[in-house]
Amino acid sequence: MSPELLEIVVWIVKVHVIFLGMVGVAAITTLAERKVSAWMQYRHGPNRVGPQGLLQPLADGVKFIFKESLVPDGANKWMFRFAPALAAAPAMLTVAVIPFGPDVTLFGITTPFSIVDLDIGLMYILAIGGLSVYGVIVGGWASNSKYSLLGGLRASAQMVSYELSMILAILSVVAISGSLDLREVVMQQKTLGEWNILYQPLAFLLFLIAAFAETNRHPFDFAECEPELVSGFHTEYSAMRFALFALGEYCAMIVMSSVAVALWFGGFSVPFLPEAHWALGIVAFCAKVSCFLFLFLWVRWTLPRFRFDQLMNLGWKVMLPIALVNLFITGAVISFAPQLKSLWNGLVNGAS
Amino acid sequence: MAEILFYVLSAAALLFGLGVVLAKSPMMSVLSLLGSFFCLAVIYLLAGFQFLAAAQILVYAGAILVLFLFVIMLLNLGELGAIAERSNSFLDSTAARIGAVIAVGMGVVGLAAASRAAFQPVRVEPGKGLDGLEAIATELFGRYSLAFEAASILLLATMVAVIALAKRQRRGLKNGGRA
């Protein structure tokens, strides 16, 4: 086999492994959501399909496929059909640049375990990931129902507000690592002491809050918000189209968790084992992402929902100023690092 | 291959642009604009400017158009037919809209030409990813830092002015309501 052909084959295999893996994890997360909620509410949760209810996502999938897919009479037919794809596609596209593991060696072929390593990987995630709001907005508008419209309206306001804080928080990490390439950022955090969470804890907190808002999860799920809006932008959706919205949300959760792990928690590096085997690296990455996914579920079934004006106040009057100050301080420390160091040395020498 | 793609994308961008001015519902106008921005971003990619493409989508598609959509949905603008009827005929208003777009376009081109004459164009090596980004950053914050800062101050001034106007209007309304 010629090298070019081999490269294409490896690439196709990687795309399938990573993409199917993510859809599989998204399906498992839906089960985990129900199991965790049951555990927190002292119930059993789904336990009839398969051992301990493990095949529930499969049964749900079959149900979604065979349900009738309604299109409301007054809806904009084409946009109504287009919106679910618009909601699910961006989250699935962003997975392409996430470094799930170090260089993998299988059958004598060595290749990095990510679909593609872009120089501007983080920009790509922010740009494409930001588009998922269109699915919500277009879906809410095309349904021609007041609840859906209000849901879409809320989603658009919320996403614009929190995207700013999120970008500023990520920029603080980019400033100290000097790269927009996720793999490059991960490679700089080989040992526990180099994890960015130690240097940018505030940025991480801001990112985490913004990630909850960006993925429309509790306590910021105003686009759905059952007590006020029936179920918000997807009130009129049923069957597979509804499932695509859900899939988009869970994929976005996975991507956000992966970005948090890669930027702040050392990505695929294994604590205390800097030269670990690549398989261990992938396991470490998956374990770290699982912790974050659990956090998403934990928060959803623990915290009450905000009020919408509180959400806006938090986004614009608290998080944005903090993120700006954090970025400013980070920039100042980087710019004046040599001076600060000599000042510190002078103080230490003067004291001794 | 790249050449064919370029022509296809340019044609698509122009068609979407026509959609922006011809669409009856403002929602479809904005979605056409989104399509047009996307075609432009892919053209940037073809030229090797990864960063510019990502910035185009991030800023225009991700933020500004969402804001447009927000305003359209908040005001619940219906079809533009009613406005078109008021101004004689649909054809007239369409012509006016196309005219306005052409005028703005000419203005932008004129401005670009003028600034090109005033400053020397930035030379950025395409296709180098972050190296290109570094070059853009060096130019933007080096030679053009004054123009860059001036633009940001202009935006800030506009924002303050809009807030001031909105506040005054609200206060006026309150007083008017009492009287």
Image (cartoon, rainbow, N blue to C red):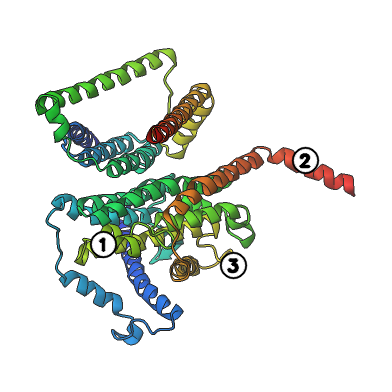
- Whole-Å distance between the Cαs marked 2 and 1? 57 Å
Q: Identify which residue is drawn at 52% across, 46% down.
A: A317
Q: Which mark is residue A273?
A: 3
Place of residue A330 in the rendered image (x, y in percent of width and height, measured from the top left): 61, 44
- Whole-Å distance between the Cαs marked 3 and 2? 33 Å
- Front of the two marks 2 and 1: 1
Task: Specify the quadrant that holds the N terminus of chain A.
Answer: bottom left
Mark 1 = which residue?
A244
The answer to whether one can see residue B21 in this image is: yes
| Position of A113 relative to A36 (above/below) | above
**Secondary element at tag 1:** helix
Dot 3 and dot 1 residues touching (CB under 8 Å): no
Q: Is residue A253 left or right of residue A194?
A: left
Place of residue A190 in the rendered image (x, y in percent of width and height, measured from the top left): 58, 59
- Judging from the image, mark 3 belongs to the subunit labelled A
Residue sitting nearer the eye, B76 or A142 = B76
Q: Identify which residue is drawn at 40% across, 38% down.
A: B51
Q: Is residue A117 left or right of residue A198?
A: left
